[in-house]
Image (tube, rainbow, N blue to C red):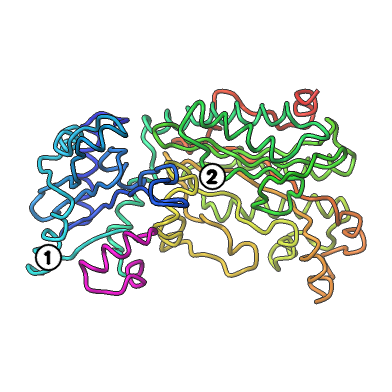
């Protein structure tokens, strides 16, 4: 386990108090077959199970009776045949004692605990399942269709987990800092390999190998592409072309399952063109504005709109936009250039707790999601609190299909200079991303070493 047993005992105590009553089920993950039963994908434990029970072994479930205070760790002990193939694994009883749980039992005990709770009128709390084996398990126990299980998840439990996991302890921040250092090594290696003729796939494999050698794995599928306008562009076998931009969005996950997430965009060949540098400097200014202004109490939605206004002002100065920048942003004209949100929470999940529902994770009664194109993709809008870890990732993108659609539909002709935008059709996209910790009165960028991103520093490093 990563933290002291007292950490997990206290987390479960707080969870019980927040939920109040009922039977809480936290399902750990099982091995998942890849292309045949015994060839599984790399195991990754459920993050909420890890947060409250700390055990990184497959086929476990944690149960907490919020009324009586009783707790169980359920799972099946391995036999000698398993030991021959996989080595020694502690007994479930030993794992329970390690995380401060008094009761352990085989996995099938779960069915009787749930049946007893339902019979006595207790509410059964579980988080939204995202694996089909868990959907089937819950459906069998609750007598509902598997497809209904996500909607049947407990809102009180979701809100309790979000309120706890959103605020990172000093111990968690230290682990995220370890992920940041691995991410630094990954991005520096990508920059060193960014030469004409090298393939995107080679760089993607290079940085994934670094993540695996220092930690558990990459925190998400690496984005390595000369088409930065494609948000989730997977690395291809296409060689890097001089004069284009390479966007690398990648992060590491430590062996203890905390994540980093950074993006850098670099000129292939080592030097920005004038046009590239002009657009890059706008993204750089937006990125730095977030670091300057982020603090407790500030709405992340307001921060996003501050960035959009600055971006519109600078794009107007370049002649790509026109008219009043404030009015343009209010109308949504800026979303031709920025179609995603400013950032998201990060922790054990790179999109922290996304599986619990962004309505609960990123918003609250005071801040609700926007329906405006582009802004509606904002994953977080709520007020910042000390201990939040956020990504700061503004970008500018030139998407030919979107440009053509807006132009054909005569979208915002008073704000968009379509004639000049034609000169940028093959530009691609630029994003700069770092991870920030909200402190008591401001924020700080995480990572002992900051990956170069100011244009002069970046060009110097590329040389």
Residue at image position (26%, 52%) is: 26
Residue at image position (46%, 59%) is: 358
Query: Which residues lie in the magenta part?
Result: 129-151
Q: Nearer the viewer, residue 241 or 99?
A: 241
Rendered image quadrant of residue 449: top right
Question: Which x, y percent locates residue 197?
Answer: 82, 35
Label drawn at residue 220: 2
Q: Secondary structure at mark 2?
A: loop
Label drawn at residue 198: none
Question: Which x, y percent locates residue 4?
Answer: 25, 28
Q: Main secondary structure of the magenta part?
A: helix
Quadrant where the C terminus is found in the figure: top right
Q: Is residue 153 above or below residue 240?
A: below
Which residue is disc 1 drawn over? 115
**Residue 137 shown in magenta:** yes
Residue at image position (56%, 37%) is: 251
- In the rendered structure, the answer to whether residue 238 lies left or right of residue 63 reads right
Q: Nearer the viewer, residue 125 or 130?
A: 130
């Amino acid at each position: 386990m990563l933290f002291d047993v007292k950490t997990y005992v206290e987390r479960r105590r707080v969870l019980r108090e927040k939920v109040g009553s009922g039977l809480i089920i936290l399902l750990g993950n099982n091995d998942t077959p890849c292309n045949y039963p015994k060839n599984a994908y790399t195991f990754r434990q459920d993050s909420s199970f890890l947060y409250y029970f700390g055990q990184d072994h497959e086929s476990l479930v944690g149960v907490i009776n919020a009324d009586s205070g009783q707790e169980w760790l359920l799972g099946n002990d391995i036999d000698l045949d398993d030991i021959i193939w996989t080595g020694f694994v502690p007994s479930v009883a030993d794992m329970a004692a390690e995380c401060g749980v008094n009761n352990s039992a085989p996995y099938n005990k779960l069915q009787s605990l749930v049946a007893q709770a339902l019979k006595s009128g207790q509410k059964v709390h579980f988080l939204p399942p995202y694996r089909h084996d868990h959907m089937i398990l819950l459906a069998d126990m609750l007598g509902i269709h598997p497809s209904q299980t996500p909607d049947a998840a407990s809102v009180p439990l979701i809100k309790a987990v979000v309120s706890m996991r959103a605020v990172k302890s000093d111990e968690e921040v230290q682990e995220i800092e370890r992920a940041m250092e691995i991410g630094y090594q990954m991005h520096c290696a990508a920059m060193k390999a960014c030469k004409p003729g090298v393939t995107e796939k080679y760089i993607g494999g290079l940085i994934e190998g670094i993540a695996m050698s220092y930690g558990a794995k990459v925190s998400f599928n690496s984005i390595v592409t000369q088409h930065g306008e494609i948000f989730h562009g997977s690395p291809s076998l296409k060689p890097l072309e001089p004069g284009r931009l390479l966007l690398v969005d990648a992060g590491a996950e430590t062996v203890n399952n905390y994540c980093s997430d950074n993006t850098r965009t670099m000129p292939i060949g080592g030097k920005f063109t004038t046009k590239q540098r002009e657009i890059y400097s706008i993204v750089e200014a937006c990125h730095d504005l977030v670091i300057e202004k982020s603090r407790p109490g500030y709405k992340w939605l307001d921060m996003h709109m501050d960035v959009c206004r600055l971006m519109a002002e600078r794009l107007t100065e370049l002649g790509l936009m026109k008219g009043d920048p404030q009015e343009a942003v209010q109308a949504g004209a800026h979303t031709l250039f920025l179609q995603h949100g400013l950032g998201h929470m990060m922790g054990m999940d790179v999109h922290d707790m996304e599986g619990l529902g962004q309505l609960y994770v990123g918003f609250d009664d005071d801040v609700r999601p926007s329906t405006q194109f582009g802004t509606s993709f904002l994953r977080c809008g709520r007020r910042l609190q000390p201990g939040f870890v956020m990504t700061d990732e503004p970008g500018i993108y030139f998407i030919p299909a979107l440009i053509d659609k807006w132009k054909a539909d005569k979208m915002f002709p008073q704000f968009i200079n379509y004639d000049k935008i034609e000169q940028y059709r093959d530009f691609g996209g630029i994003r700069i991303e770092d991870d920030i910790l909200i402190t008591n009165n401001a924020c700080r960028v995480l990572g002992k070493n900051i990956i170069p991103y100011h244009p002069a520093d970046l060009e110097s490093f590329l040389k």
